[in-house]
Image (cartoon, coloured by chain):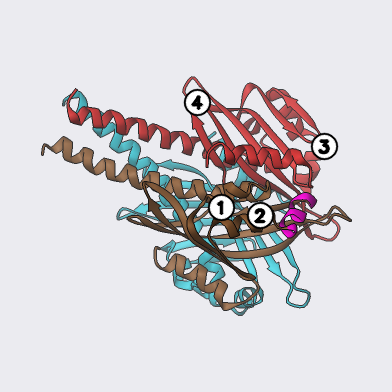
Chain colours: A cyan, B brown, C red
Amino acid sequence: MTDTSELVAQLADRVQLLEDKLAIMHIISAYGPAVDSGSAEAVAGLWTEDGVYDVDTGSMSGRAEIESMVRSSNHQSYIHGGCAHLVGPPHIAIDGDTAVATCHSQLVLRDTETGANRVARITANRWEFARLNGEWKVTLRTNRLLDGRAEARDILAAGVTATV
Amino acid sequence: MTDTSELVAQLADRVQLLEDKLAIMHIISAYGPAVDSGSAEAVAGLWTEDGVYDVDTGSMSGRAEIESMVRSSNHQSYIHGGCAHLVGPPHIAIDGDTAVATCHSQLVLRDTETGANRVARITANRWEFARLNGEWKVTLRTNRLLDGRAEARDILAAGVTATV
Amino acid sequence: MTDTSELVAQLADRVQLLEDKLAIMHIISAYGPAVDSGSAEAVAGLWTEDGVYDVDTGSMSGRAEIESMVRSSNHQSYIHGGCAHLVGPPHIAIDGDTAVATCHSQLVLRDTETGANRVARITANRWEFARLNGEWKVTLRTNRLLDGRAEARDILAAGVTATV
């Protein structure tokens, strides 16, 4: 192998890693717009077929359950009254064909009586990904309320101590 | 063409796309700091000469109108009382020399009497870009309040269903 | 030098710059998860040994003082009551082995009596970085409250006018 072709092979690996990081950002940045527009299939399509979305109030397994959440009367009342699921910039660690992203999210809800917005939830997020057939998908997203519970702090700590 | 030079050409295309995505992020991440510091020319300079900023309360056409908004007594009272225009991580789709980015924004305002902050607005954002003379600029930004109106959900849905 | 090897050298520089930008994002996106989980060493490790964290209420010099802030009873009461240090997407300017990133942050605190969240602080952030032994570290982070004071606007203006 010549020096140039070796350098090109190394560059290709570095570019692939950059693309992987932007692909993870692309998925996470789709969640808020998809869920706040009631795009149930687009939300569920971020996960693998049997992906899990584990939130404080229960766990959804597979795309059908995630779609049901988006179509639920509870979620529909949020989006028709005014809401924003704000997901912060993720801290990403990629390891071959799997990845973990750690971030915060906020749920802002509008009070339909007064028109005032309030921060209804602040949440610790852990997103786990796998690359399947060349495409990144969420295998497990775990959300825990930042209300003082240790579980939420544990999620955040795990995301940074492994990679800083 | 040798194998190596072909691979290099492909790599150059992939690097260009990564650069384009970061350039779009760079523009969007400038908006909040520019507008909250009253940097009227820096705000307007994110747009093309005849770019449009379409918000619920009206539409600004061209840089002069965007600068006027920043210099308006209304906006000046926000920034001198305390405010934050928080723009979330964008979901970006690039197609050659045009691009669309979809995200949320929040306006947090400080009450100058009590010193308390409130989330005055939650907003759906659609940013349209064009590459002109090698530089990305905003051609149209459309903001709609997330207060239950269908238009805001439509903006968010369009941004994710086209690209997920 | 052949045309191909020249092109490869140019590509390598472009890839390096992209990696640098993502490295800066990686550090900034670690702050919130680290500080909200009380990971004192992970927080302090984002800075250089003698790095400075300058906030409205005072300035911390060196990692030991930053760790002390995380371990302080004040900060511990925040994280055990429920809080989120939300850091927005940074606007990044890299110049060789130094970099500046400008963004907003928000502190959301949960009221332990009522369970309600409030936006306790909105803040202008300036992060200065240096590359040391191939690794980016924070040399100075300056935070100023967006409560109308000119200093906060100055921080934001400096970050965008230099790079737009």
Residue with the mark numbered 4: C135
Real-space Cα separation, disc 3 to disc 2, in angstroms: 41 Å
Q: Amino acid at mark 4?
A: Glu
Q: Position of residue A105 (x, y in %)?
A: 62, 55
Q: Is residue B79 magenta?
A: yes
Across and down, in percent, residue C6 comes to 24, 28
Residue beneath disc 2 = B70
Q: Quick check: marks 1 and 3 in contact, CB under 8 Å?
A: no
Mark 1: few, some, or many residues within 10 Å (few <14, many ≥20)?
many
> Height in image: C78 above or below B114?
above
Is residue A66 visible in the rendered image? The answer is: no
Query: At x 54% / y 33%, what residue is drawn?
Result: A164
Q: Secondary structure at mark 1?
A: helix
Label at residue B44: 1
Name the element at disc 3.
helix
Alpha carbon distance from label 2 to label 1? 9 Å
Disc 1 to disc 3, C-alpha distance: 45 Å
Q: Which residues are magenta?
A: B73-81
**Viewer-proximal residue among B51 and A86:** B51
> Residue beneath label 3, please?
C73
Say what secondary structure mark 4 lies in: strand
Question: The residue marked by circle 3 belongs to what chain?
Answer: C
- By secondary structure, the bulk of the magenta-drawn segment is best described as helix
Residues beneath discs 4 and 1 located on the same chain: no
Q: Chain of mark 1?
A: B
Q: If you read the primary sequence from the N terminus, does the residue marked by circle 4 or circle 3 appear first?
A: 3
Q: Depth check: B8 or C133 in front?
A: B8
Asked if badges 2 and 1 are on one and the same chain, I answer: yes
The answer to whether residue A141 is magenta is no
User: Which disc number belongs to residue A42?
Assistant: none
Residue C103 percent across, percent down from the top left: 62, 43
Which secondary structure lies at badge 2? helix
